[in-house]
Image (spheres, grey):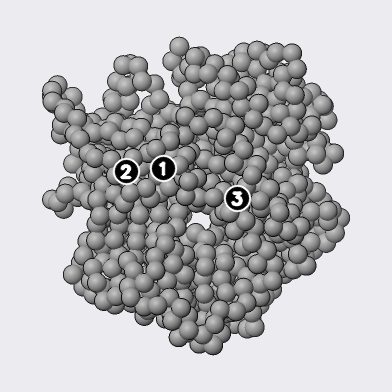
Amino acid sequence: MRVVRGETTGFAHTADLTEAGLRSAAEAASAAARGDSAGVNVVPLAMQHVDATHEVLILPEDVEKARKVDLLARADSAAREEGSAITSVTVGYADAHRRFQVANSLGLLAADDQVRTRLRVECVAKGDSGMQTGIEAPGRSVGFELFDDVDAEEAARLAARRALTLLSAVPAPVGRLPVVLRRGAGGVLFHEACGHGLEADLVGKEASVFRGRVGERVAPESVTLVDDGAYPREWGTYAIDDEGTPARRNVLIDRGVLSDFMWDYMRARKEGRAPSGNGRRESYRHLPMPRMTNTFLLAGDEDPEEIIRSTDRGIYCVRLGGGEVNTATGDFVFGVTEGYLIEDGEVTAPIHAAQLTGNGPEALAGIDMVGSDFETWTGICGKSGQGVPVSSGQPTLRVNGLTVGGTSGA
Amino acid sequence: MRDDDVDLLDLARRIAGRAGRGEEIEVYATRRRDTDVEVFGGEVESLSVSGVHGVGIRVVANSRQGFAWAGSLDADLVDDALAEARDNVEFGQPDEWYGLASGADVADLSDRDSADLGAAHLELWRDDLLAVTADDKVQLALELEKATRSADTRVRGVEAAGYGDAAIETAVANSLGIGAQSRRTVCSAYAVAMAGAGVETQTGYGFSAGRTIGDLDLETIPRDASERAVRLLGARQPRTSRLPVILDPLVTRAFLGVLSAAFSGESVLKGRSPFAGREGEEIASAAVSLVDDPTDARALGASTHDSEGVPVRRNELVVGGALRGFLENVYTGRRAGRPSTGSAVRGGYKSMPGVGVRALRMEPGRLSPGEVMASVPEALYVQSVSGLHSGTNPISGDFSVGAEGLMVRAGELAEPVREVTIASTMQRMLRDVAEVGSDLTFLPGPVAGVTLLISEMTMSGA
C-alpha cells in the first residue's frame, strides 16, 4: 500500500489479507505519508485490458515434479561426461508464476500473469593450475516449453566446456586495450554503463552523468539503444509494469543521440509526462522505481569476423559476469568470466578472470565497430536491495579502449 | 490469531511434534518488523514500515530430504507447507548423512540448556528501539541529510540519506528435541555525499550502525561521507604498476566476505575451497588470525544459536597464518566426521540451512591506520572497490576488482586515483598481508573491518 502526498511516499505491506490486516497496513502507510483523514472518496475501478505479449504454453505447475527432477539428473550426467576434470556440478531449475493486481485512487485497475522458467548449470573443473568454474543459465518468460528451445544437456555441456577451457587460461593482460564483445556477452556492459544512468530516479537526483543531455550526441551514429519490456518471451518481459502501466519499446539512444530516460509513475508525474512502463518492484514488499526490462543495443552492419580480424591486440569477451556502476560518475566495472586474447586479428589463448573498468559515456563514445549479429543474455539486476529479472542484448561490437585489470607482466 | 501474536517457538515445536515413525521434522520460524526512511532534498522521499514472517520446514525420511516454506504463520498455510515438504522428500536423492541437529550436537556445550537458549547471556534486543516514533526516525534522516549537505562547501548534493531498523525474532525446533529461539534489534543510518563542480562528480559514503538509535554516531556519518567524496576530487587514472596496497576497513570487510566461503565445510565438500585438506598448513602471513565469533555481542551478527538450533561458539579459522579448520553445519559436519560448529546460516525462512560466518573478524594488530601508512614509502590506499562479486572467482581465488582511492606518499594521503583495477588471488593476498591495523570496526553484516597492508599487488591503470 502506497500513499503519496506531495513528493512524500508512505508505504506499508502485509501478508495478512483480512480486512483488519489491510486496514492496518493502509493506516500505517497513510501515517507514514503524513496523510490526514480527508473522508471517503469513492473511485470507480474498471479493469483495463492489456494484450499479453505472448502465450505461455505449459504452465510450470502443470508439470510433474518428477519431470523437473529428471531434467536436473540428465543435465548433471551430461556435464560430468565432459571429462574427469569436472569435479563438481550444480544444476538448478527454477520456475515462477507471479500474478498480481494493482489498483489506485486514480481509477486504475490492472492485472498481470507472468511466468518465468530458468535452468542454471555451474561446473567446477580442477587441473594443475587450480580450479575454474563455468556457468550456463538460460531463462525466458515462458513455461516448461523453455526446454523445446533449450536442450538442458547441451547447456550443461557448454558450462562444463567453459570450465575446462579456463584450465588452460593465461593471465589476463593489464592496461588499456580494445575490447571485442561477442554477441550477447556485452549487453551487461551497456546495462551497467548507460542503462542505470538513464533511469529517471537517478537522473532526477542529479546522480546521473546523462542528466540534461537529451538531444545531445552521446555515441556514434551506429549506436541505437532500446529498452523493450514488451519483447515477446524475453526474460525481462511483462504485459504491465508493477504500477499498471503497459510495457512498451522505449528508444533511449537513437542513432547516437540521447532521446529519453526510463520512467515510473512518481518521476513521470513530477515532470508532467507519462510513465514509460518501467515502474518495477521485486514484490509487494517493495516500492516501485524505474528499472530496465530487456535492454538492447541494436545490430549494425559490420561482419562480426571482420571486427576480430581488424583488431591487432585486444580482448575477446565471450561471457561477462555481473557488473556495477556509479551512476553519478559513470564509472563502471564488470568481470570477464570467459575471455580470450586477440593477437594479430585472431582469437588465441583463454584468459583468467579479469575486471574491465571504464566510464559509461566514454565507453559509448568509444564504440567503433557494430556487428550484424545479435544475441541476448539473462540476469537478475539488483538496485537498492531489489532484484528483478532483466535481459540485455547486443551484436558483436568493439569498444576501442577499456582498462583490463589482469595480472600478467607489470 | 494474528500472525503478530503467534509464539514462534511454540508453533515450531507443535509442527515438529507431528513427525511420524522414521521421520524427522525441523521448523524454522521467523518474524521481523522493518522501518526504512529515505529523504531527498529536505523532504521525506519514502517511509516504509513492514512486517514479514514465515516458516521453513525440512523433513528427513528414508535418507531423503524435502523442504517447503510458507510466508505466513497461519495454521492452515503452515500445514500446507508441511504437506509439501513431505511430498518433496520423494524427489530427493538419498544421502545417508541427511539429518537434523540432536542432543549430540549441543552436548559439548551442555552447561547451556538447549531449550533455554533464548535466555542465554547475549543481550541483542533493545526495547527502547521499538519505542522510537516514526517521526523521530524521519527527523534523524532529515538532519543527517542537512548535515551532510553543509559538511563541506565542495559538497554539491546528497545523493541519498536514510535510516533503517529491524526487530527480528527466530525460533527453530525439531522432532529430535532441539528448541531454541532468539531475537535481536539492529539499526543503521547512512548518507551519500556528491562533491564536485561542472562535469566532475565524486561520491562518498558514511554510515553508522548499532542495536538501537542511541548507538548511532550521527556526527561521523556526514563527516565521512563528505570527506570521502571531497578527497577524490581531481582523481585521475594512474599508470599501471606493482606497489603496496592499503585496504580501508570497509574494503577489507568486502574481501573477507568473499573469502569466508573458502572456510565453509560446504565448499570443502563440493571441492570449491582452495584450502580443503590443508589444516595445519601456513595459508597466510603470520600477521593473519581469523576468527568467527558470534558469541561476541559487539558484532551485529552475534547470535545465541545457529539456524539449526545448535548453540554458536567461537571458531578459530586461521591462527598466526596457519589454517585451523572449517565451519560446519550438521550435514557437512557428519560428512566430514566432525561435529557441527554451530555455523548453519539461512537467507531467511525460504532457504535451507547452508554454512556461513556470522561474526568474522581479522584479529587487530598494533599499528594505527596512520602508522600503517607511514610504514611504506608509497602505496595505493583503496577507499572502495566495485565488482567484487563479479570479479572474483571464489573457487580459484582469482580476483580483479575496480578500485578508487588515493596514493599514499611519506605516510600521507596524496593525489586521488580512479578507474584502476587491483588484481591478485585470495591465497596470495593472504600471504602478502604485511600489517593488520589496530582499528577493528564492527559493521552491519557478518564481517568486521580493519585496515590492512598488502605488501604488493598489481594496480592496472593507463
Q: According to the image, label 3 marks what residue?
A: A153
Q: Give the amino acid at mark 2.
A: His
Q: Is residue A72 left or right of residue B331?
A: left
**Relative to B444, residue B203 above or below:** below
Q: Is residue B77 visible?
A: yes
Q: Where's residue A164, x and y in %?
A: 68, 63
Distance, label 1 to label 2, CA atoms, is: 9 Å
Circles 1 and 3, Cβ within 8 Å, touching? The answer is no
Q: According to the image, label 1 marks what residue?
A: A142
Q: Quadrant of the N terminus of chain B?
A: top left
N-terminal of the two: label 1 or label 3? 1
Residue furthest front in the image: A148
The chain to which mark 2 is attached is A
**Could you tell me which residue is drawn at 51 percent across and 25 percent down?**
B70
For label 1, the crowd category at 10 Å Cα-Cα, with few meaning under 14, some 14 to 19 and many 20 or more, is many
Circles 1 and 2, Cβ within 8 Å, touching? The answer is yes
